[in-house]
Image (spheres, grey):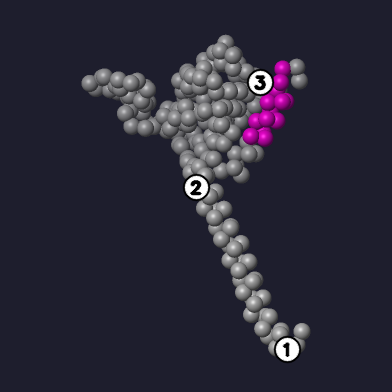
Amino acid sequence: MNSVEISGFIPKLGLVVVGIVLAECTRQGLNYLLQRKNSKPVIRQVIFFPDKQIACKDFFDSVEGCSRIRCDFSHTTTGFRQLLSHKKSARKSIDIAVYCISCFEIADVVLQRHKVGVRVRVITDQSMEIAFGSQNHRFMKDGIRVHTNKPPFLMHHKFFIIDDELLCSGSFNWTSQAVTGNNESVIITNDPWTVEPFLAEFQKLWQETKPGN
């Protein structure tokens, strides 16, 4: 190839390279837009307790709403109501690893989801099975599988995972005192980098706490 041919070839080669680069950029851009269209909104939320008021159950849960002329309970969304709404959003599964479960209202929501076909698995601390107000017996009576750890060490986690994609984790035990008395916090996220290690931890604990192990 002489110098004249080379000088004519180089611009053509440049156009080919530019065309390939533009095609790849277009492909990546379309993939990005498609992923954004199909992706769910990112959830990053923090809830602090205690709630200043107890939420009115009739106002939030009853079809008729609250009929009291002067209601002593809150008609605004509390931290507790936000936490319950996440539990109610479960469509496939709820995996629970919580040290102490004695709050009747939280247990009610879990049982409701179980009754409509949501798979529920519970891991809790063995010492809490006989604690005052423990809800373990209600779970087991309705067919929910409950695993407990082996002493002397504690299963001290306080997290649950909704549908393998939404994590709620913090210092919050499922007790009435945690709702209206203690200083507690819960972080809620669907960030896969955070959720996936908790999924693995739950599965590991579920295997380790199988009866007979």
Mark 1 vs 2, N-terminal side: 1
Q: Position of residue 99 (x, y in %)?
A: 59, 25
Crowd band around label 1 with a 10 angstrom C-alpha radius: few (<14), some (14–19), many (20+): few
Q: Position of residue 61 (x, y in %)?
A: 37, 22
Any part of residue 62 in sight: yes
**Disc 3, disc 2: CB below 8 Å?**
no
Determine the residue positioned at 35% across, 20% down: 62
Any part of residue 127 in sight: no
Q: Against 131, is 1 above or below?
A: below
Q: Amino acid at mark 3?
A: Thr
Q: CA distance from mark 1 to mark 2?
A: 51 Å
Look at the numbered disc 3 and give the secondary structure of its residue. strand
Tag 2 residue: 37
**Disc 1, disc 2: CB below 8 Å?**
no
Q: Against 181, is 114 above or below?
A: above
In the shown orientation, is residue 195 left or right of residue 212?
left
Q: CA distance from mark 3 to mark 2?
A: 41 Å
In the picture, residue 100 is in which quadrant? top right
Instruction: Tell me if residue 149 is in the magenta stretch.
Output: no
Tell me which secondary structure the magenta stretch mostly adopts.
helix
Q: CA distance from mark 1 to mark 3?
A: 81 Å
Of residues 65 and 40, the one drawn nearer to the viewer in this rendering? 40
Of residues 211 and 34, the one drawn nearer to the viewer in this rendering? 34
**Disc 1, disc 3: CB below 8 Å?**
no
User: Which is in the foreground here, disc 3 or disc 2?
Assistant: 2
Q: Which residues are magenta?
A: 199-211
Determine the residue positioned at 52% across, 44% down: 39
Tag 3 residue: 148
Q: Which mark is residue 3?
A: 1
